Image: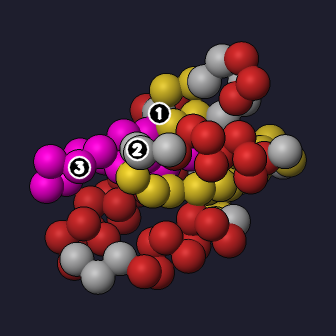
Amino acid sequence: MVREVRFLPPAEKFIRKIKDKALKQKIKEAIDAIREDYTVGEAKKGDLNGIYCYDVYYNRTNYEIAYIVERAGDEIIVVIMAGTRENFYEQLKKYIR
């Protein structure tokens, strides 16, 4: 099932700034996988309840994509944030407050 994907400003900014074509392709493939089946990401618990995170490993660096699924008629994937794993969850928590 192909769903619509929307990007919030932090995710859009991170993806736009990627210069490495191979990394950009890996992120695009990850978003396509999420679009097909949003359960591929890990559902978070606690203060990040309702948010899914998907890992992308590239060039010995772990990148995260955080997203939610809105269920208004058709399901819409909303990518909240993307970035390297370092300080990712702290930044995510700050952004969603």
Residue 89 location in percent, x, y?
A: 57, 39
Which residue position is annotated with label 2?
A: 85
For badge 3, the amino acid type reads Thr
For badge 1, the amino acid type reads Gly
Q: Quadrant of residue 78?
A: bottom right
Could you tell me which residue is drawn at 42 percent across and 80 percent down? 17
70, 14: nearer the viewer: 14
For badge 2, the amino acid type reads Arg
35, 42: nearer the viewer: 42
Question: In 3D space, how far apart are the residues under numbered discs 3 and 2 (Cα atoms)?
Answer: 8 Å
* Nearest to N terminus: mark 2 or mark 1: 1
Residues in magenta?
54-68
Dot 1: element: loop
Mark 1 against mark 3, which lies toward the viewer?
3
Image marks 3 and 2: residues in contact by CB distance under 8 Å: yes
Which residue position is annotated with label 1?
A: 41
Position of 6 relative to 83 (above/below): below
Which residue position is annotated with label 3?
A: 61
Residue 23 location in percent, x, y?
A: 24, 66
Dot 2: element: loop
90, 50: nearer the viewer: 90
Q: Is residue 29 left or right of residue 13?
A: left
Q: Is residue 31 left or right of residue 10?
A: left
* Nearest to N terminus: mark 3 or mark 2: 3
In the rendered image, residue 81 lying in the magenta stretch gets the answer no
Image marks 2 and 1: residues in contact by CB distance under 8 Å: no
Residue 97 location in percent, x, y?
A: 84, 45
Could you tell me which residue is drawn at 41 percent across and 45 percent down? 86
